[in-house]
Amino acid sequence: MVTSGRAACSITPVQSSPMKIDWQHQWMSIPYQGSSNTLFGQFAALPDESTLQLALLDEVPEQSSEPAIPLELEHLLHTYQQLFAVPVGLPHRRFCDRSIPLIPRATPVAVRPYRFAPALKDEIERQIKDMLSNGLIRPSTNPFSSAVLLVKKKDSSWRFCVVYRHLNAITAKSKYPVPNID
């Protein structure tokens, strides 16, 4: 409500309800624990006066987000760096190859890809190209297909996620499920 240049308003925040503010006279009344606390503002300096405020600012050194690695651990990581390397290619063939058991008479599921902005589409294509060149995936003529999503990570890079909901719906459930570990 504004009357003759004076504005009074009533605000209702969660902790202090109701709080009253008079903008013209620069005061604010806040009820707190049964009493009313009033804050008064400072009036602006007169036109013929001037105020100069100086502040000394120190530069805060940037803290590294990565914790310091102890020297012994750093030596071990360097010695066994091949164990901690990013995998290149698929793992070796094993004695028993795995398959996904489907329910009887299930038809292949081919899900249409989601629409993405051009920048995200380029990121998906870049990640697929990287995975193909590293041998982590290979071209397939399989009639099944699933959609993909990009999820932003804490470091602002993108995580490539495959949506297997439709495939999971036609997968035969295990008779001997793995128990939950609580």
Image (cartoon, rainbow, N blue to C red):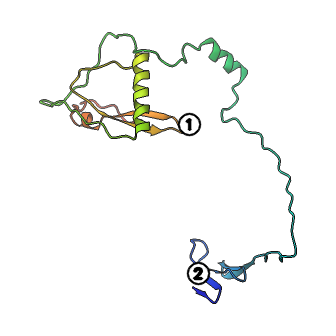
Q: Which residue is mark 1?
A: 155
In the image, residue 60 lies at what x, y percent? 78, 43
**Residue 110 sits above or below residue 6 on the image:** above
| Residue at 65% from the left image edge and 86% from the top image edge | 5
Could you tell me which residue is drawn at 25 percent across and 35 percent down? 111
The answer to whether residue 166 of the structure is visible from this angle is yes
Q: Quadrant of residue 37?
A: bottom right
The residue that mark 2 highlights is 10
Q: Is residue 101 left or right of residue 125?
A: left
Amino acid at pointer 2 = Ser
Q: In this view, which residue lies farthest toward the bottom?
A: 4
The three-letter amino acid code for the residue at tag 1 is Asp
Instruction: Name the quadrant of the N terminus.
Output: bottom right
Q: Tell me how far mark 1 sits from mark 2, CA to CA.
A: 43 Å
In the image, 41 versus 170, the foreground residue is 41
Q: Residue 15 vs residue 124: left or right?
A: right
